[in-house]
Amino acid sequence: MADGRVKTSRMRRRLEFILYKELSDADVSVRVWKRNGGGAADFNLQFVDVPRPKNPYLLGVAFHEIGHIHHYRTTKRYDELPLYELEYMAETYAIDKLKKHGMPTREYRAYATKYVLVCCAKYKNSGGDVMKIPAEIRKWTKMKVRKWIAARRVLVENTDINSLGDIKIRYKN
């Protein structure tokens, strides 16, 4: 076996071990192993649909879905919170778990920030007040509040990102 494949195989086993431990600790089961990079959480049945953790990024996606169930269990009226708050809570949970297991977080943090910004933009574009978005979330996403308030619409571009600096936002007036 080539040296690179040995490393990849070891890494996958390590990532799967970490995921199974976290699933067990959270008392959550996998319903479906997703083929793409997305995921889903069923709050009522305590199941997640997640990709197999082939890299730290996909492990973060799985942690994100576990985070939804964790917060559903521990936060009153969780299902009544706005989407941007639900996603922020799940993303910070995932990043904390990645850090706990010594995984790199730069790429996942950039993706997570972009995702929360997309949710905030949907809220703003549907008539929501940007100032009602908690300050903690505005700070975490590095939201340029004055530009968001002045804009009629905010668009978070769907581009590949590797770092926070790669996130592109357009403001329509």
Image (spheres, helix red, strand yellow):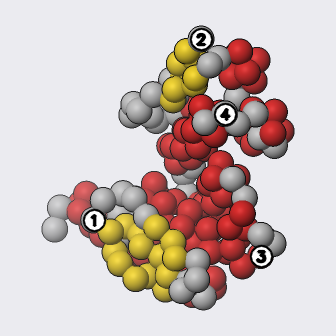
Give how far across and how far down residue 115 sits, in percent: 54, 44
Q: Is residue 29 left or right of residue 3?
A: right
Determine the residue located farthest toward the front in the rendered image: 127
Q: CA distance from mark 1 to mark 2?
A: 39 Å
Question: What amino acid is found at the position of numbered circle 4 in the picture?
Answer: Gly
Q: Can residue 92 be seen?
A: no
Give whichever of discs 1 and 3 has the lower sequence position.
1
Say which residue label 1 marks.
35
Q: CA distance from mark 1 to mark 3?
A: 30 Å
Say which residue label 3 marks.
74
In this view, the residue in front, 138 or 11, is: 138
Give how far across and how far down residue 87 sits, in percent: 62, 54
Quadrant the C terminus occupies: top right
Say which residue label 4 marks.
127
Q: Would you call the spot at circle 3 few (<14 residues within 10 Å), some (14-19), or many (20 or more)?
A: few
Q: CA distance from mark 2 to mark 4?
A: 14 Å
Say which residue label 2 marks.
173
Give whichever of discs 3 and 4 has the lower sequence position.
3
- Residue located at (49% from left, 86% from top): 29
